[in-house]
Image (spheres, helix red, strand yellow):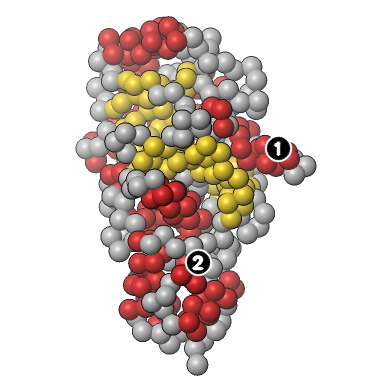
Amino acid sequence: MHDARSATTERPRTGRPRTLHDFRLAELEAWVVERGYPRYRARQLYHWAYQQLALDYGVMSVLPKAMRQELQETLPITNLVEVRRRVTDDGETIKFLFRTEDEHFVETVLMFYPDRTTVCVSCQIGCAVGCSFCATGLSGLIRNLTPGEMVSQVVYAARVARERQRRLSNIVVMGMGEPFQNYDAVLRFVAIVNDRQGLGIGTRHITLSTAGMVPFIDRLAEEPYQVKLAVSLHAPNDGLRSQLVPLNRRWPVDELLAACRRYVAKTGRRVTFEYVLIDGLNDDEKTAAELARKLRGLLCHVNLIPYNPTPAAPLYRRPAPERIERFRAVLEHYGIPATVRYSRGVEIAAACGQLRAHEEARRGRRLPAVAGQ
């Protein structure tokens, strides 16, 4: 009676199998109508997927049994499988490790704060940027994640938050990967999680973090979504930043900051600069003063992040608390607002890439040494 063509043979431009989490509502309506079902069934599916946070068609009792069976066979809700979960001693940070359908691993972190609940989402498997202090970047890039794989991370996190009578309120795309190297998929992900018929997370509660891909900062400023922009800066000059962030050789500090100024002028929105403090490298008062002078007059906020130790970069260390405080004090002396944000979940390997690396090692698989697509 109904067209039973397998959705698993319908692949988006990424080449990955399509899932329910890849669809926007209008697309899902067209999909169900094409298969002979009433259009309203798509809204019922969306309700179950994003209001009830269902991961199994079997619980969608409002749908006909035959339709549920067909969907089970042709359109998986998600292709992520949770394989590991670690929780901090205080229970306020949870790290998930998911396996994809092509047997790779993706990390997601859920963080509970008094005034919000935030999920940190990955957008790639690995990363091609290669920041010298980052476990993800040192492993290279396997592939981009699909919009659905990113949405699934949010749904899993929202389910766990709901178990604690908390509503997932914020999304930061600061996990594995460089969002602007997967730009179209990330923007599609934003559209799906923002849909009022779905999760309904406001774009002002969504932050995209880039290592500094200048053309995409300009492009983002033209988008209709009022997402927040975070830039991983880590140094105020090219010599030091190129050592930490190889992407700086393509888009140097002054060029990057000029793009940030254009972004602020276009959108009126503040830029957040992420600055990882590494002992003896970029954490002295002279460097703080140089950073402050570079940022003078720019609508911004600096998040100072004391380095989270990882075996991937054993020579780097976290600065002493007094050095961290002096760095912050210098910025504020120059009128640059700054906050010290200690990385959560050190005891559960919550820094980007650590849990994935542990799992790959456990399975006897070596991570790639260079980026690949």
**Kind of residue at badge 1:** Ala
Dot 1 falls on a residue whose secondary structure is loop
Q: Residue at x 61, y 34 (%)?
A: 354
Q: Residue at x 56, y 82 (%)?
A: 5
Do residues under tags 2 and 1 come within 8 Å of each other at their CB atoms? no
- Looking at the picture, how far across and down is residue 97, in whole percent? 58, 45
Mark 2–mark 1 Cα distance, whole angstroms, equals 37 Å
Please state which of residues 1 and 95 is positioned toward the viewer in this rendering: 95
Which of pointers 2 and 1 indicates the residue nearer the eye?
2
* Picture layout, residue 64 above or below residue 75: below
Residue 216 in view (yes/no): no
Please state which of residues 318 and 220 is positioned toward the viewer in this rendering: 318
- Identify the disc placed on residue 56: 2
- Looking at the picture, how far across and down is residue 172, in whole percent? 40, 41
Please state which of residues 14 and 338 is positioned toward the viewer in this rendering: 338
Q: Which residue is mark 1?
A: 369
Residue 198 in view (yes/no): yes
Q: Earlier in the sequence, mark 2 or mark 1?
A: 2
The quarter holding residue 330 reads top left
**Kind of residue at badge 2:** Asp
- Looking at the picture, how far across and down is residue 96, in whole percent? 54, 44
- Looking at the picture, how far across and down is residue 200, in whole percent? 30, 56
- Identify the disc placed on residue 82: none
Q: Is residue 320 left or right of residue 103?
A: left
Q: Residues within 10 Å of mark 1 (few under 14, many from 20)?
A: few
Residue farthest bottom in this picture: 1
Please state which of residues 55 and 228 is positioned toward the viewer in this rendering: 55
* Picture layout, residue 74 above or below residue 95: below
Q: Residues within 10 Å of mark 2 (few under 14, many from 20)?
A: some
* Picture layout, residue 39 above or below residue 299: below
Q: Residue at x 63, y 59 (%)?
A: 101
Q: Residue at x 32, y 39 (%)?
A: 116
